[in-house]
Image (spheres, rainbow, N blue to C red):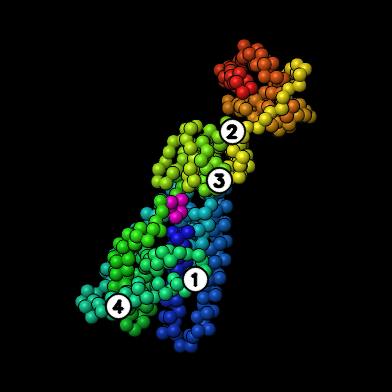
């Protein structure tokens, strides 16, 4: 929560700071510009910026989710286009372009859009490049000959901001948010972050405000002292106060779902909570179907290859690869992971004492429901479990029915006990026309021969 608060503050501060600077420049430069005009400026800029940002963010997210660009490198280009549209549209409507871009980026970052990891990596590099450029600009605009005259004022202002203004602002802003005193201290010690103060210091210079060069030189000291003293000491102070964590403030995407989705699969990430039913259980107890595979466990800053005996711990993030046609089953399964029961095997109904009659026929619409590859009812009897799914392009499945019988589906449908279905599968195996069909009947024979059948 502490890290997310700092991340959110860093983004939301910038539009407000820009408006404050513009407003105070108006006080100094424009006759008749007063408090009422300042309030009107804030309401209009923030309101229009928020509306445009949310609208462009939602539209961009939907466009990226529905599009299939030919190259993954085009997705960062599309995100830049979305940011440009958000900024330009808000500014054209006399709104805050900065707030609009921030909300658009927030919408894109919160959605499971294709190539998300590539987009994130690109913008992280672009952000660092932008900050470096701003600090170089700061160095080019500062007049070294003028610094000695302002060193006392600049240093005093930096100390007041770091030791008085920021801590008092934190205490006034979060009295009822449930932060511990250690968290309030570290929030108060988090000073100026990024290159925005440098950009804001150039506004008065551009507008020709009297003594604006002195303001810019003073900003140099404030940014320098905050960056050097608070930036270097922030992490040691956080460790000393015991508010550090190994969990990232914003989880990083490990897999680009866009490429996987084009192959007919989905990547689902499940964060394990302390109270989840699967906490402390083993991977083999997750109850994943054959259409899903747990391919990665992220524990802290390590990626662990899962085994059936691997024990799941609170704080783990499970990455599950699941075929698209089976992805609709995952919400119900993850709800079981959260609430339980876990590992309890569902009792299958027992066959009646009389020997069941085996029958085999074509797939018939008025008797069978669903798809042969994922049937819902076979012979007007509900399917309670799907044991196998055919993978060679021909729809087919091996299922358990509510009356205790088994059935295989596909171009032909067979119903009966496990032994009768095995005999039928052996006969079909001898008549198999290709290797794929032969592999399918062998899979059915093996599944029905398992001890639990």
Disc nearer the start of the sequence (2/3): 3
Q: How far apart are labels 3 and 1 at the CA level?
A: 32 Å
Label 2 near label 1: C-beta < 8 Å? no
Residue 356 vertical position relative to residue 238 in the rendered view, above or below: above
Secondary structure predominantly adopted by residues drawn in magenta: loop
Quadrant for the C terminus, please. top right
Q: Indicate whether residue 285 is drawn in magenta.
A: no
Q: Quadrant of residue 221?
A: bottom left
Q: Residue at x 43, y 66 (%)?
A: 181
Q: Are marks 3 and 1 in contact (CB under 8 Å)?
A: no
Identify the residue under disc 1.
175
Q: Which mark is residue 289?
A: 2
- Determine whether the residue tagged by mark 3 lies in a helix, strand or loop: loop
76 to 435, vertically: above or below: below
Q: Which residue in the protein does label 4 denote?
A: 156
User: Sequence-wise, which precedes: disc 2 or disc 4?
Assistant: 4
Residue 95: x, y in percent? 52, 71
Of tags 1 and 4, the one toward the viewer is 1
| Magenta segment boundaries in residue numbering | 247-251
Give the residue number, with chain letter if any, for mark 3: 276
The residue drawn where x is 48% and y is 53% is: 78
User: What is the quadrant of residue 129 in the picture?
Assistant: bottom left
Helix, strand or loop at disc 2? loop
């Amino acid at each position: 929560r502490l890290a997310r608060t700092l991340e959110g503050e860093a983004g939301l501060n910038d539009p407000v700071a820009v408006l404050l600077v513009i407003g105070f420049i108006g006080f100094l430069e424009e006759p008749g510009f007063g408090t009422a005009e300042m309030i009107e400026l804030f309401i209009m800029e923030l309101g229009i910026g928020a509306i445009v940002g949310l609208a462009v963010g939602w539209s961009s997210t939907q466009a990226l989710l529905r599009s299939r660009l030919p190259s993954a490198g085009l997705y960062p280009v599309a995100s830049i286009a979305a940011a440009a549209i958000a900024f330009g549209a808000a500014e054209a409507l006399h709104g805050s372009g900065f707030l609009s871009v921030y909300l658009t980026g927030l919408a894109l970052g919160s959605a499971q859009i294709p190539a998300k990891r590539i987009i994130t990596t690109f913008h992280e590099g672009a952000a660092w490049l932008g900050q470096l450029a701003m600090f170089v600009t700061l160095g080019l605009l500062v007049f070294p000959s003028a610094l000695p005259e302002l060193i006392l004022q600049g240093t005093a202002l930096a100390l007041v901001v770091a030791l008085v203004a920021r801590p008092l602002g934190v205490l006034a802003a979060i009295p009822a948010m449930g932060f511990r005193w250690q968290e309030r201290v570290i929030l108060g010690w988090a000073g100026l972050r990024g290159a925005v103060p440098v950009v804001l210091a150039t506004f008065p210079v551009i507008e020709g405000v009297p003594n604006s060069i002195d303001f810019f030189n003073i900003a140099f000291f404030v940014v320098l002292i905050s960056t050097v003293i608070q930036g270097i000491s922030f992490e040691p102070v956080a460790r000393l106060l015991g508010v550090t964590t190994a969990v990232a403030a914003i989880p990083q995407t490990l897999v680009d779902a866009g490429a996987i989705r084009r192959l007919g699969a989905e990547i689902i990430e499940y964060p394990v909570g302390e109270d989840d039913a699967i906490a402390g259980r083993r991977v083999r107890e997750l109850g994943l179907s054959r259409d899903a595979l747990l391919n990665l466990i992220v524990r802290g800053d390590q990626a662990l290859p899962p085994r059936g005996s691997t024990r799941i711990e609170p704080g783990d993030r499970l990455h599950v690869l699941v075929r698209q046609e089976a992805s609709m089953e995952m919400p119900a399964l993850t709800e079981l992971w959260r609430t339980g029961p876990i590992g309890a095997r569902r009792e299958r109904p027992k066959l009646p004492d009389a020997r069941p009659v085996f029958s085999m026929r074509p797939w018939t619409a008025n008797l069978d429901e669903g798809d042969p590859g994922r049937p819902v009812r076979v012979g007007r009897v509900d399917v309670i479990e799907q044991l196998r799914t055919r993978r060679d392009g021909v729809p087919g499945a091996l299922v358990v029915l509510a009356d205790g019988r088994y059935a295989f589906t596909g171009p032909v449908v067979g119903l009966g006990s496990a032994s009768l279905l095995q005999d039928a599968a052996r006969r079909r195996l001898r008549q198999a026309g290709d290797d794929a069909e032969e592999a399918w009947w062998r899979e059915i024979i093996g599944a029905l021969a398992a001890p639990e059948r």
